Structure formats: structure tokens, C-alpha cells
Amino acid sequence: ETGVTQSPTHLIKTRGQQVTLRCSSQSGHNTVSWYQQALGQGPQFIFQYYREEENGRGNFPPRFSGLQFPNYSSELNVNALELDDSALYLCASSFRGQEDGYTFGSGTRLTVV
Amino acid sequence: GQSLEQPSEVTAVEGAIVQINCTYQTSGFYGLSWYQQHDGGAPTFLSYNALDGLEETGRFSSFLSRSDSYGYLLLQELQMKDSASYFCAVILSGGYNKLIFGAGTRLAVHP
């Protein structure tokens, strides 16, 4: 089975710009979640998608948005980038109902300058 | 709100046993998970406790006590490759599931 792949691995953007990060879910998984991990901290839940709809969101502003596609791949979009958005963005796929089966990708390191 | 506390750093020697504790303030959760993350890598699932008690997976064991709001990860026969950050995380229930992570414990294994 394939794991979770994310692209790009690294990205540098300027404050105010927009960015799109991509994630391919593990085969057989139907739910994708996105997390933001600041340096030296634990991942923070951004939102979750199931059946192509957002069904849960953490404490992140609306400029963080996402999509899930029929093949369960996903995108995270961030508008009007701020310096504090610099972080590692992790995608995790799972199968709804299997609470112990989260598989994470290696993440996208976003730097906002 | 929900919060999980774990020590920021732990140091041990090869071959030793180390226990990483996790205390939490939350309710309505499915279980407690543990993840390992090497620098620059993906968090990797280690163990999950849905019920109170001990779960053993090779050199790693995890424990949960809901009445004490406490859990721990036990790593035995430590190897250099175990040097990494370890995160406890609760899986919150209610409409959709999400992981709430602690800040992580950085484990350094020395020869």
C-alpha cells in the first residue's frame, strides 16, 4: 500500500501571497486532515475533509481553506500569507471509524518572508 | 478546552528503559495515541489505547488510565535510532474525529 505523499517539500513565499499545498491519501483511506506544526511544537488541527466536504475545523481563520477530490487527494490553500504562517504543514489520512489509523505525510515546510 | 502535558526533554543511554508521561485535560475522547517524529520526518503511529490498561507492541508499550487522566509510553532496550520527538495525542469524538497533540518530548539516546 502507498503512504501519504505531500508536495512540495519546501516552499518560500512572500507575505501577502497565496499558497496551495497538495496531499495524496493512503490507498483505502477516505478522510484527510491537515495540521500545522510550528518549530518545537505539536501539530495543531486545521481542518478535516470527508466525502469532499469540510466536516471539522480548528482555530484557524477562513483564509485557510481546503478541498478534497473524488480520489481522496486534498489541497490546503492559504491566502494573504502572514509571517506566523511559517511552519510545517502535515497531511494525515485515515479511514472514518478506524480511530487508530492515522497516516501522516512528511509535510511541506512553508517559509513566509 | 483540551490540553496535554508531557516533559519537554528526556535523556537515556542505549539499552535502558525510559517512560514518557502524558497528563491530559479533556473529555469525550476515543483514546490516547502515541507518535514518533524524527527531525524533518512524518509523525509515525506507535501505539493506541482505547481502553484503560497496557498495550504492548514490541519494544514499545503504552498505558492509559482514564480515571487518572494519565498515560505513558514505555520504550525498552533503547537504541540510538529511538532518538526522536514523541507526541501523545487524544482522539476527540463528537461529529468528527481529530487528534489533539501534546507539545512533544524530545528523547536523546546516548551510547
Image (spheres, coloured by chain):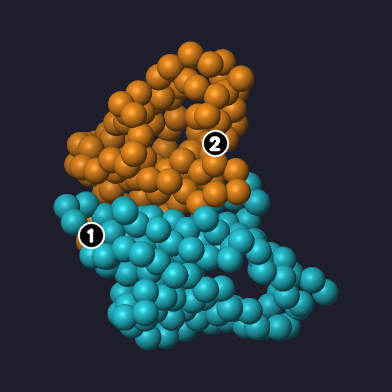
The numbered dot on residue B93 is: 1
Callout 2, which amino acid? Ala
Residue underneath mark 2: A87
Element type at marker 2?
Answer: strand
**Quadrant in the picture for the N terminus of chain A:** bottom left
Circles 1 and 2: CB distance less than 8 Å?
A: no
Q: Is residue A25 visible?
A: no
Q: Residue at x 72, y 70 (%)?
A: B11
Residue A20 picture location, percent across and down: 43, 24
Tell whether B31 sits left or right of A10: left
Q: Residue at x 43, y 17 (%)?
A: A80
Q: Residue at x 17, y 52 (%)?
A: B95
Residue A10 picture location, percent across and down: 59, 31
| Chain with colour orange in the figure | A
Where is residue A113, by image quadrant? top right
Where is residue B63, by image quadrant? bottom left
Q: Nearer the viewer, residue B1 or A37?
A: B1
Chain where mark 1 sits: B
Mark 2: few, some, or many residues within 10 Å (few <14, many ≥20)? some
On screen, residue A95 above or below A83 = below
Callout 1, which amino acid? Ser
In the rendered image of the structure, the colour used to display chain B is: cyan
